[in-house]
Each structure stands twice: as structure tokens, then as C-alpha cells.
Image: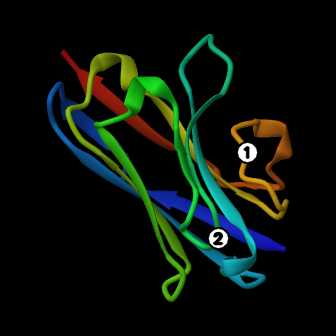
């Protein structure tokens, strides 16, 4: 089993940038597709971005396309989410998750392992 720990959250003004990191330990990282999700207060957890273990497939939700970039470094067992041009509506707890399935997915319930989350707050 893989364990995930997110970092890099914080408070930033609208228009600013943050880079989230998700470090894994345990089972080899390369066996998993990785996703980022977020959950704002009173809302359901929503998909943000996902990347296959081969780096050949990447998905984004429409609201972050052109602003966020997901990447992974399999040698460092880490996945990143670079967030630029942040907006107040990006405020949420951000979670990384690992999926051992074959097909890259946007569906939270398909992910096997979750981190504890990191808070991102964007002020207007």
C-alpha cells in the first residue's frame, strides 16, 4: 500500500501561485495513476487533475485548464500541482490520491489511497 502526504498549501492573494506536492511512500509509486481533488466547505469533493503513471495521459477539470499543471517525478515518488492565476473560488482543501486501476479516471471513488489534505485559501 502507498501512503501519501500533501504539502505546499497556504494563503495567497488572487492572481498568485502555489505549488502543491504529494510525496508517497510504501509500494512503488510508478504503479499508480495520481489525481488531485479539492473540497470546499459545504461542497462535495471534486476532481481537479489526474496523470497516468506513464505521464502520457493528463486530465483537468475545465475550471483549471490553462491555470493548473499536474506533473510527477517517479524518481522522487512525488506528484505536483502547479497552480497559477489563483481565484477565490479555488479555495478548498486539496487532496492527492492514488489509483491502481488501468484507466485514468476523474471519479473519486475509483482512487484507492488518499492523503490528509492541504488547505489552499485565496483572498480577493
Q: Residues within 10 Å of mark 2 (few under 14, many from 20)?
A: many
Q: Secondary structure at mark 1?
A: loop
Say if 34 sits above or below 124 in the image: below
The residue nearer to you, when weighing 75 against 18, is 75
Q: Residue 53 got which mark?
A: 2
Q: Residue 105 got which mark?
A: 1
Q: Residues within 10 Å of mark 1 (few under 14, many from 20)?
A: many
The disc, 1 or 2, on the residue closer to the chain's N-terminal end is: 2
Q: Specify the quadrant of the image occupied by residue 122.
A: top left
- Residue at 64% over, 70% down: 53
Q: Secondary structure at mark 2?
A: loop
Q: In the image, residue 58 lies at what x, y percent?
A: 53, 52
Q: In the image, residue 57 lies at what x, y percent?
A: 58, 57
- Residue at 67% over, 79% down: 30
**Residue at the outermost front position:** 56
Q: In the image, residue 5 lies at what x, y percent?
A: 58, 63
- Residue at 67% over, 78% down: 29
Q: In the image, residue 22 lies at what x, y percent?
A: 52, 63
Q: How far separated are the C-alphas under marks 1 and 2? A: 12 Å
The residue nearer to you, when weighing 74 against 89, is 74
The residue nearer to you, when weighing 109 against 69, is 69
- Residue at 84% over, 74% down: 1
Amino acid at each position: 500500500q502507498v501512503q501519501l502526504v500533501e504539502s505546499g498549501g497556504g494563503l495567497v492573494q488572487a492572481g498568485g501561485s502555489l505549488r502543491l506536492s504529494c510525496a508517497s511512500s510504501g509500494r512503488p509509486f510508478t504503479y499508480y495513476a495520481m489525481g488531485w481533488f479539492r473540497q470546499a466547505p459545504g461542497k462535495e469533493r471534486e476532481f481537479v487533475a489526474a496523470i497516468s503513471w506513464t505521464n502520457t495521459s493528463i486530465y483537468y477539470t475545465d475550471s483549471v485548464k490553462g491555470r493548473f499543471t499536474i506533473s510527477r517525478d517517479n524518481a522522487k515518488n512525488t506528484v505536483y500541482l502547479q497552480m497559477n492565476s489563483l481565484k477565490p473560488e479555488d479555495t478548498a482543501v486539496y487532496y492527492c490520491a492514488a489509483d491502481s486501476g488501468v484507466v485514468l479516471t476523474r471519479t473519486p471513488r475509483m482512487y484507492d489511497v488518499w492523503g490528509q489534505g492541504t488547505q489552499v485559501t485565496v483572498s480577493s
